[in-house]
Image: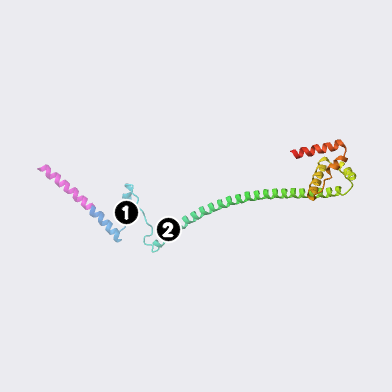
Amino acid sequence: MLEYSVVSVGLRIFVLVLLIIVLLLGGIIWFDYLGLIDAKSKIAPIFGLFGIKRAIIENVDDPLLLEKERLKKQIEALALRAEEHGAREDKITLQEQELAQIQEQLEEKEGALEDREKMFNERVRAFENRRVNLEQNSAYLVGMPPDNAVKILINMDDQDIIDVFRMTEELAKKAGEASLVSYWLSLMPATRAADLQRKMAGQTGG
């Protein structure tokens, strides 16, 4: 019975002491809230022993504190927006470089096509000019005595003679007249006439 009383008294004392500590802490916090004492700075070391770091707000009494916080948030938002804007600019710059490269390639292809067209037109003009010359030479040779025409033809290259012969036959066919090519060949040396006929047959067959 005595042992039970001793335990009960000790427990009561512990509870009373704990109650006093709780009331003491509650009073300190209440007085700190009322602004009668500055308990935060005094109990901060105690929190530090337990590894608890309390957020300290400087200049609590500053009337512009809320305005400064709002301005700070706006600055952070502007910084984020500027970063996003910079990323978009980089993307646009990359796209512009790609478009410039594509445009350069297209210009190169266009230039190559223009060169091809120019070469083709030059060949067409050269062909047309040669055809005009062949028509004029054929008409000139047809209009002179055959012996004189053969003397001129013999001094020409074989391919030029063949071209004149073909133009003469074409013009005669269009005019519905007989061609003088066979007669010119009969007036030429036999060897030269045979070579020309063989070449004309070979080119026609090819």
* Amino acid type assigned to the residue bearing label 1 in the image: Lys
The alpha-carbon separation of the residues under discs 1 and 2 comes to 31 Å
Is residue 90 or residue 70 the one in the foreground?
90
At x 33%, y 52%, the residue is 44
Q: Amino acid at mark 2?
A: Lys
Residue in view at x 19 percent, y 49 percent: 15
Q: Mark 2: which secondary structure?
A: helix
Extreme-bottom residue of the structure: 63
Identify the magenta region: 1-21
Q: Is residue 136 left or right of residue 44?
A: right
Query: Mark 2: few, some, or many residues within 10 Å (few <14, many ≥20)?
Result: few
Q: Along the horizontal axis of the image, is 105 left or right of 120?
A: left
The picture places residue 181, in percent across and down from the top left corner, at 83, 43
Front-lying residue, 102 or 14: 102
**Does the segment drawn in magenta span residue 8?**
yes
From the image, state whether disc 1 or disc 2 is nearer to you. Answer: 2
Residue holding disc 1: 42
User: 203 and 160: which one is in front?
Assistant: 203
Circle 1 packing at 10 Å, graded few (<14), some (14-19), many (20+), is few
At x 12%, y 45%, the residue is 5
Question: Where's the N terminus, which quadrant?
Answer: top left
- Decide whether the magenta segment is chiefly helix, strand or loop: helix
* Residue 182 in sight: yes
Q: Secondary structure at mark 1?
A: helix
Per the image, the residue denoted by label 2 is 73
- Residue 198 locus on image (x, y percent): 80, 36
x, y percent for residue 71: 43, 60
